[in-house]
Image: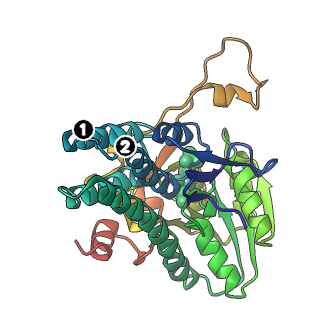
Amino acid sequence: MYKTIEWTDEGIVMIDQRVLPLEEKYVCLTHYQEVAAAIREMVIRGAPAIGVAAAMGVALGMKRLPPETPPAEVTGAFGRICGELAATRPTAVNLFWAIRRMQQKFDELTGEPLPAQQAGLIAEACRIHEEDIAANRRLGEYGRALFTADTTFLTHCNAGGLATGGYGTALGVIRAVHESGRKVAVFADETRPFLQGARLTAWELQQLNIPTTVITDNMAGHIMAQGKIDAVVVGADRIAANGDTANKIGTMMVAVLAATCQVPFYVAAPLSTVDFELAEGRGIPIEQRDPREVTHIRGLQLTPDGVSAANPAFDVTPHPYITAIITDRGVAFPPFNETLARLAGR
Ligand code: MRU
């Protein structure tokens, strides 16, 4: 079984998601700058996975400080490392959440000798990783309870083990239903332009022996209108307090189509994906990626020379389109600004 990310004595090992499914290649990163580049260039991607990677990146950067580094320089280095990792991708809140956790741990360790600080930060990053896997499993269990019959799902992008510390959020729900003995089938949107659905979701589901049909994104409405889909389940990069959900570009289109076809639309995400500081989705920063991801596929040019292309990587699904949000502390139904806050104990 593959591992999305792992802390080792040699460095941070991650599966290179840019080359899947054609190649199963692992990279070992030994400098935090390499971790920042890996997040930016999508060697690792998916909101919870980049949170884990950033936490490990902080621990890695700090581990490399020589033992004689004066305390003021240690603090300076910590700020610089966190800043560089935070500047990699703007939308997924898990990245900032994980860096904040590392900051809290660093603050707790103030005054300790550097080796103790380094060990404490490594332990905290590994804890964030383990907690994410455990949160996904709990979330999967809550989701499973919603689907008590054989179910055909539609999903968009990849919210599986590859996008998390392991197990998955949207795919975690699908896996849990499958593991409960129900007959499960999945339609996976290809997810242009980076093809997370066609490449990664299809690969993961194949390994789990879950029957999967890849469709291009523009087929989703037709398939739903034919009555082939019982439920849509997707992951999230950031959820505002009112339930508005940023996820991979195209998710909003699927949500609107699902409402039109009366198919329930579920979001699956740990509570660490909820940004309670944002009242609504309008404030969520949307990453704009290189237009070359749209104009080219693996170096093959698709569009005329010089044509301009847009590449917003995420969109925001307004909360009225969302049937429920499946979290690691239970399922939130509308009104989300009340139910999410209650689940988070706020
Ligand atoms: O650009 P990506 O591949 O990082 O986007 C990933 C998604 O949009 C996922 O659906 C989301 O992060 C949830 S992953 C559990």
Q: What residue does disc 2 label?
A: 65
304, 202: nearer the viewer = 202
Residue at x-position 56% and y-position 69%: 264
Q: Quadrant of the C terminus?
A: bottom left
Please state if 258 lies on the left or on the right of 187 as rendered. Answer: left
Q: Label 1 is placed on what type of residue? A: Glu
Q: Quadrant of the N terminus?
A: bottom right
- Callout 1 crowding tier (Cα within 10 Å): few <14, some 14–19, many ≥20: few
- Which color mode does the image show? rainbow
Q: Is mark 2 within 8 Å of ligand 1?
A: no
Residue at 60 percent of width and 55 percent of height: 257
Q: Amino acid at mark 2?
A: Leu
In the displayed structure, would residue 139 be above or below residue 265?
Answer: below
Whole-percent x, y for residue 160 in the image: 62, 63
Q: Position of residue 132 (x, y in %)?
A: 47, 68
**Residue 285 located left or right of residue 197:** left
Contact between marks 1 and 2 (CB within 8 A): the answer is yes
Q: Residue at x 40, y 78 (%)?
A: 329
**Front-lying residue, 172 or 81:** 81
Q: Earlier in the sequence, mark 1 or mark 2?
A: 2
Residue 309 visible to the viewer: yes
Q: Bin the neighbour count of mark 2 within 10 Å (Cα to Cα): few under 14, some 14-19, many 20 and up.
A: some
Q: State the CA–CA distance, disc 1 to disc 2.
A: 9 Å
Give the residue number, with chain letter if any, for mark 1.
73
Indicate the secondary structure of the residue bearing disc 1: helix
Above or below: residue 121 compared with residue 341:
above
